[in-house]
Image (tube, helix red, strand yellow):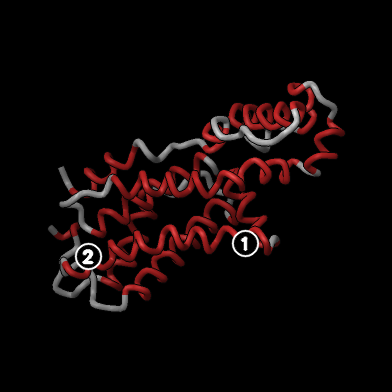
Amino acid sequence: MSCRRYAEERFHTLSTDNLFKELLTQVKGERTVKQQRIVETAIRLFAEKGYYNTSTAEIAKAAEVSEGSIFKTYGTKDKLLLHLLVPNLKAMFTSNIDAVFREIGSGISFEAFLKALLKNRSDFFSENKEIFQILIKEIIYNEELKNDLLPYIAAVITPRISALIESAKKQGELVDLPTERIRTTLMTYFGGLFVSRFVLLNRSFISDEEIEDSVRMLMDGFRESSSPSPNDE
């Protein structure tokens, strides 16, 4: 079995986590009975029908409250979603990333890992596209949210990616450039790829061919000249 196929199969079970379903297990908090009913009903309907296909009127009817009480408490449907998501997002993000990186094992090249990781996160964002779109749009305009989430996400990802880059340099897979330069380029490119495809272009997935091309282009820029591409072996 090729390194690429091996990595893809090991990551497959982690690629379809539905955040709405995960939220159902984490929404207990200091709320009134009515607020808790609204929260649990909203998440259930979002998970069943999708965020954009669920109206506040449907949430109110299923929760047996008036639609006005939802607007009074949360303002808009987007703000209701953010109220549900943001307090739990950090814990969910860390546990999800840790689960992905725990699957890394010996014998997988850095290039094969990048392809498997990009495929895994593409499937994850495809499954949670509505949440991803709303978060990105909110981060653009909400400085408080941006200053809270982005440094945290960077702090979680940076040491994990840096360790892999250092290992790949020692194995001769990557050119001996500063780790920060390689990491910044990878994170900027992949972040831009996800935002452009799932938010700006509103696509439902990133094709395997585009993943292959993206990783190959990046690796051609950072690969040690004496290190062959897995496709050449």
Q: Is residue 170 left or right of residue 210?
A: left
Furthest-bottom residue in view? 177
Q: Nearer the viewer, residue 60 or 224?
A: 60
* Type of amino acid under label 1: Lys
Residue 126's tag is none
Residue 215 place in picture, x, y as percent: 33, 60
Residue 109 position within the rendered picture, expressed as x and y whole percent measured from the top left: 21, 57
Looking at the image, which is closer to me, 96 or 211? Answer: 96
Mark 1, other Cα within 10 Å: few <14 / some 14–19 / many ≥20: some
User: On the image, numbered disc 1 is attached to which residue?
Assistant: 146
The N terminus - image quarter: top left
The answer to whether 149 is drawn above or below residue 80 in the figure is: below
Circle 2 Cα neighbour tier, 10 Å, few/some/many (<14 / 14–19 / ≥20):
some
Describe the element under mark 2 as helix, strand or loop. helix
Picture quadrant where residue 28 is located: top right
Give the residue displayed 61% in from the left and 43% down from the top: 85
Q: Which numbered disc, 1 or 2, marks the residue closer to the eye?
A: 1
**Residue shown at the point (40%, 70%) measured from the top left:** 185
Which of the two labelled residues, at mark 1 and mark 2, occupies the earlier sequence position?
1
Query: In the image, 35: left or right of 43?
Result: right
Left-right relation of 11 to 4: right
Image height check: is 204 above or below 174? Answer: above
Of 82 and 56, the residue lying toward us:
82
Percent from the top left, x then y, of residue 38?
73, 29
The reply, left or right, for residue 75 in relation to residue 44 is right
Q: Amino acid at mark 2?
A: Ala
The percent position of residue 146, horizontal first and vertical second, equals: 62, 61
Taking the spot 21% from the left edge, 49% from the top edge, the residue there is: 105
Which element is circle 1 on? Answer: helix
Disc count in the image? 2
Q: Which mark is residue 168?
A: 2
Report, in whole angstroms, how far the alpha carbon at label 1 lies from the one at label 2: 32 Å
